[in-house]
């Protein structure tokens, strides 16, 4: 069985719409926790993924879009760097966006069998949310939840029957936002969420790498 400190492959994937006035220098500073974690001294040098078939970290100046399809070797300590990156991206983002992070156990081999002990993978998955304000974060969280719930329930119900479910989800998010405003602590993430304004979600299973 792999030790707790076994190396991981961390894949970061997503698209973040940026404000029209954001320039490369601002983005380089915001992404510093990520490229410096990879051991680079600039975004240009740290933008390349560990896999040649992945675009890496791309800044589309015409579309004002940050594109992430980037893998790096590391460990669980990258979570702090990801939180710092999200905090900085909040200030540059135009709308709410999701960033998927997948942790692959680099020492786990599904084909190997051990008679002495069971082998298990430490693969993990989480969603990060960034946005210019808590309302934008909650909007993208709401949209993602509605999509997931509808996809599951359409196996058993017609889409026309699910209006009440969407209404209830909207009511719950409205209550959460009202509670956040009432707390007078807008900068703090809503209950059950993670770094920056953004929340996190976790899931098991060994997921394929995302490619553009």
Image (cartoon, rainbow, N blue to C red):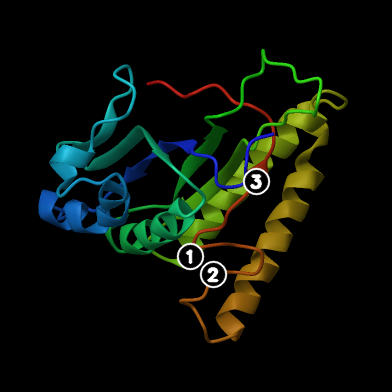
Q: CA distance from mark 3 to mark 1?
A: 17 Å
First of labels 3, 1 by sequence position? 1
- Contact between labelled residues 1 and 3, with CB atoms less than 8 Å apart: no
Q: Nearer the viewer, mark 3 or mark 1?
A: 3
Examine the rendering and report whether any part of residue 12 can be seen: yes
Residue at left 58%, top 51%?
Answer: 141
Q: Is residue 163 left or right of residue 58?
A: right
Going by the picture, which residue comes out furthest to the right?
Answer: 156
Q: Which element carries disc 3, helix, strand or loop?
A: strand
Task: Classify residue 95 as left or right of residue 206.
Answer: left
Instruction: Give how far across and how far down residue 51 sits, in percent.
Output: 34, 22
- Where's the C terminus, which quadrant? top left
Q: Give residue 82's position: percent from left, percent from top.
A: 42, 54
The vertical placement of 156 against 72, above or below, is above
The residue labelled by disc 3 is 202
Q: Quadrant of the N terminus?
A: top right
Q: Nearer the viewer, mark 2 or mark 3?
A: 3
Query: What's the CA distance linking mark 2 and mark 3?
Result: 17 Å
Residue at image mark 1:
197
| First of labels 2, 3 by sequence position | 2
Q: Position of residue 95 (x, y in %)?
A: 38, 52
Residue that sits furthest to the top in the current view:
111
Mark 2 to mark 1 CA distance (whole Å): 4 Å
Of 158 and 142, nearer the camera is 142
């Amino acid at each position: 069985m792999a030790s707790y400190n076994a190396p991981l492959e961390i894949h970061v994937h997503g698209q973040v719409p940026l404000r029209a006035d954001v320039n490369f220098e601002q983005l380089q500073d915001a992404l510093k926790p990520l490229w410096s974690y990879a051991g680079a001294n600039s975004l240009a040098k740290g933008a390349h993924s560990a896999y040649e078939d992945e675009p890496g970290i791309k800044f589309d100046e015409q579309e004002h879009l940050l594109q992430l399809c980037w893998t790096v070797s590391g460990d669980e300590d990258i979570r702090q760097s990801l939180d710092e990156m999200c905090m900085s991206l909040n200030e540059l983002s135009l709308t709410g966006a999701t960033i998927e992070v997948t942790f692959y156990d680099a020492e786990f081999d599904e084909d190997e069998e051990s008679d002495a002990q069971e082998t298990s993978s430490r693969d993990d998955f989480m969603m990060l949310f960034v946005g210019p304000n808590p309302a934008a974060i909650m909007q993208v969280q709401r949209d993602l939840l509605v999509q997931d719930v509808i996809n599951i329930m359409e196996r058993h119900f017609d889409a026309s029957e699910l209006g009440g479910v969407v209404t209830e989800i909207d009511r719950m998010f409205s209550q959460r936002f009202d509670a956040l405003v009432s707390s007078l602590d807008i900068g703090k993430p809503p209950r059950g969420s993670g770094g920056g304004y953004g929340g996190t979600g976790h899931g098991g299973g060994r997921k394929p790498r995302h490619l553009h």
